Amino acid sequence: MKRRVGILISGRGSNMVALADAARDPAYPAEIAVVISNDPTAAGLALAEARGIATRAIPHRHFGRDRAAHEAAIDAALAAEEVEVVCLAGYMRLLTPFLVGRYAGRMLNIHPSLLPAFPGLETHARALAAGVKFHGCTVHLVTEAMDEGPILAQAAVPVRPGDDEAALAERVLAEEHVLYAAALARFLTGDAGRAPTAALHNPLPDTLPAP
Ligand code: GAR
């Protein structure tokens, strides 16, 4: 039976679309119960609606500095849709221990770097500045600390000579879409929720010998 997943977004929503499109497969272990955005203008809301998914805009600005009240509203919206697992997909607000605790062990995030390298913002620019030869993305369980928590899956991409931030971001984003859907499926069906596993998907350059 499909598990009910809620997705939190703040903007473009391309990772949300990747999860929603994967979930259209009857064999995929999740259905997207609701997409919630803290930004009512988020492009992802319309993309979710176009796919027939329930959406809610819960603007943090309506709650002023009362983060607890904002998260209580999100929690109520998730509960109303009987959400079991939450996926953060470009949700750009820090969560308080309240919501993290409510979904402890069943809240996933995708981050555009190979954590623990480059937590936070502007990961692609920082990767280029650091001169790393591989960059990528990580799906991890959410804990109270930002961009930390047990790693469920990672995908690496090469940094190519001449890459700028946009080119690198595009290469990573394509891997994010594949990785998130695969990692969520594995989390729901396998033992990845109990013990972090090795990489699911690691598209190394095909000049390297196969393992
Ligand atoms: C994605 O690259 C995601 O990894 C990143 O925001 C982007 C959202 O794009 N998330 C973070 O930086 C979280 N720390 P999307 O809205 O098209 O999925």
Image (cartoon, helix red, strand yellow):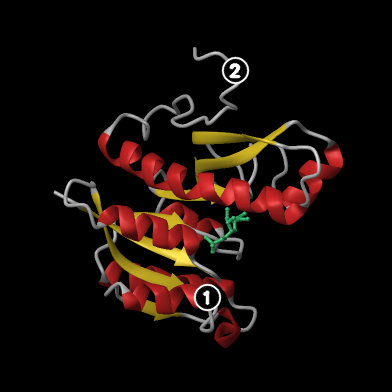
Residue under label 1: 38
Q: Looking at numbered disc 1 in the image, what kind of residue is underneath it?
A: Asn
Query: Relative to 34, does residue 137 appear above or below in the rendering?
Result: above
Indicate left or right for 170 with 22 as reference. Answer: right
Q: Could you tell me which residue is drawn at 41 percent across and 27 percent down?
A: 195
Q: Looking at numbered disc 2 in the image, what kind of residue is underneath it?
A: Leu
Residue under label 2: 208
Query: Relative to 124, does residue 8 appear above or below in the rendering?
Result: below
Indicate left or right for 106 with 115 as reference. Answer: left
Q: Which mark is residue 25?
A: none
Query: Relative to 149, does residue 66 appear above or below in the rendering?
Result: below
Residue lying farthest to the left in this orientation: 1
Q: Could you tell me which residue is drawn at 55 percent across and 63 percent down?
A: 91
Q: Position of residue 78 (x, y in %)?
A: 34, 67
Secondary structure of the residue carrying tag 2 is loop
Q: Could you tell me which residue is drawn at 56 percent across and 87 percent down?
A: 62
